[in-house]
Image (spheres, rainbow, N blue to C red):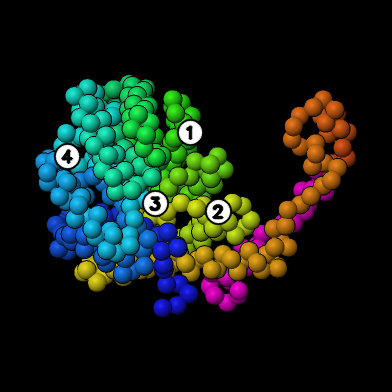
Amino acid sequence: MDAYTPNKSDRFTFGLWTVGNPGRDPFGPETRVPMRPTYIVQKLAECGAYGVNLHDNDLIPFGASAAQRDSIVREFKGALEDNGMVVPMATTNLFSHPVFKDGSFSSNDPKVRAFALRKTMDAIDLGVELGAKIYVFWGGREGTEADACRDPRSAIARTRDAMDYLCEYVKDQRYELRFALEAKPNEPRGDIYFPTTGHMLHFISTLAHPEMVGVNPEVAHENMSGLSFVHAVAQAMECAKLFHIDLNAQKIGRYDQDLRFGSEDVRQAFLLVRLLEGTLGGAPYTGPLHFDSHAYRTEDEAGVWDFARGSMRTYKILKAKAKRFDADPEVRALIAEQKDAALDPLLSGYTREKSAKLRGAVLDPEELGRKGLSYEKLDQLMMEHLLGVRG
Ligand code: DIG
Ligand code: MN
Ligand code: MN
C-alpha cells in the first residue's frame, strides 16, 4: 500500500473483456483459461478497481433464453453487491457474430439492421438493469473492404437512423442513460466509418437528440490514425462531450494493440492525465477511467492482475507528477497566460469599433518574430519531472 494504490474514489474501471481476454490472437489460440464474470468482479475489487463494464455477450451468451439471462444477471448482481463494485458503462457486441460481418446499423440488409436494433435494445435494458449510466457504441464492423458495396452516405444515414431510434427508445423507457460513440479508423474492417473522434463529434451534431450523445475516445484508436489523442480529448472536453474514455497504449502505425496504459508513449500519457485531471487549471474530467486494454498473450492469470494493477498505478503516478509539474514555479512562469489590457478586449466579439482599433494598433511583426518562447526549457522541465529528477 502506497500513494499509488488505487481505491474506489479513483473511478478506475475495466471491461469484462479486458482482464478476461484469454490471449487469443489472429495467429494462435487462447493462452489463458477463460475466467467467470463473477470471479473477474471479485478480483478487480481486490485490485482496487471501482467498476466493471460489459458487452451484452460478455455476460449473457448469444442466444441465451430469458430464464438463463435472468439467472445469470441475478448471480452477477450478487457478485457486484458482495464486492462493492458498480457497472458505469455497458455496450453491445455488434461485431462478433457472423450476422454482423458486413456491419450492423450500416448493413445493406434491413434484416441485419433490424436484428442489430433489437439486440441493442435488449442490451440497453441489461445495462440499465445493472446500473449503467453510459452506453458505448463502437462500430467495429461498420465499414468496408470493397467500398463499391454502398454509397458511404447511406452508411451515415442508416447509423443516424439507428442512433435517433435508440435515443427515442431510452427516452420512451425513461432510462437515465447517455450514449458515447467510439471511433476507430480500421480493424477489423479495412476502413471503418466515423474513423476519428472528430468525425464522431460532427456526426453527433446531425442527430435528433445530440444532447444525449457524446464520445468515448480511445488512446490506441486516435494513435492508429497518427493523431494527437490529447487534442482529440481536449476538443471533446471543450464542447462537454467527453462522456467516457478508453485508456490504453499503442505504438504508432501498428494494429490495435490495446496495451497497458502508459506503457508506450509516457509523454502523451502524462499530458493526457494532466488534461483529464485539470492540473493546468481547466475543468477536470469526472467520468469513469476505463482501461480498454489487456495483458500480453505471454501472461498467466497472475500476469493479468499485474496488468490491471500496473494500469491503475501508472495513472496515479502520472497524476501526482502532473500536480507537481503544474505547481512548479518555473513551469508556471513559463506558461503564464500572456495578458494585454489594450488588445485582449479587441480579440473577440467583433464590432466595427473594435476592428477599427485593431487596425490602428501598433504591432511589429519583426519584433514579435524575434521573441524566444523557452519551450526547450519548458519541455526539459517536463522531462525532468517525468524522469524523477525534479518535483
Ligand atoms: C474496442 O476498443 C471497443 C470495444 O471493446 C467496446 O465496444 C468499446 C467499449 O470500451 N471499446
Ligand atoms: Mn482498441
Ligand atoms: Mn475501446
- The kind of secondary structure the magenta stretch mainly shows is helix
Query: What residue sits right under mark 2 in the picture?
Result: 284
Mark 2–mark 1 Cα distance, whole angstroms, equals: 20 Å
Which numbered tag is attached to residue 246? 3
User: Residue at left 33%, top 69%?
Assistant: 47
Query: What residue sits right under mark 1 in the picture?
Result: 211
User: Residue at left 55%, top 53%?
Assistant: 284
Residue 248 position in % (x across, y down):
38, 56
User: In the image, is residue 7 part of the stretch drawn in magenta?
Assistant: no
Quadrant (top left, top right, bottom left, bottom right) of the C terminus: bottom right
Instruction: Kindly tell me whether mark 1's CB lies below 8 Å from ligand 1.
Output: no
User: Residue at left 36%, top 63%?
Assistant: 49
- Sequence-wise first label, 1 or 4: 4
Instruction: Kindly tell me whether mark 3's CB lies below 8 Å from ligand 3.
Output: yes
Start and end of the magenta stretch? 365-391
Secondary structure of the residue carrying tag 2 is loop
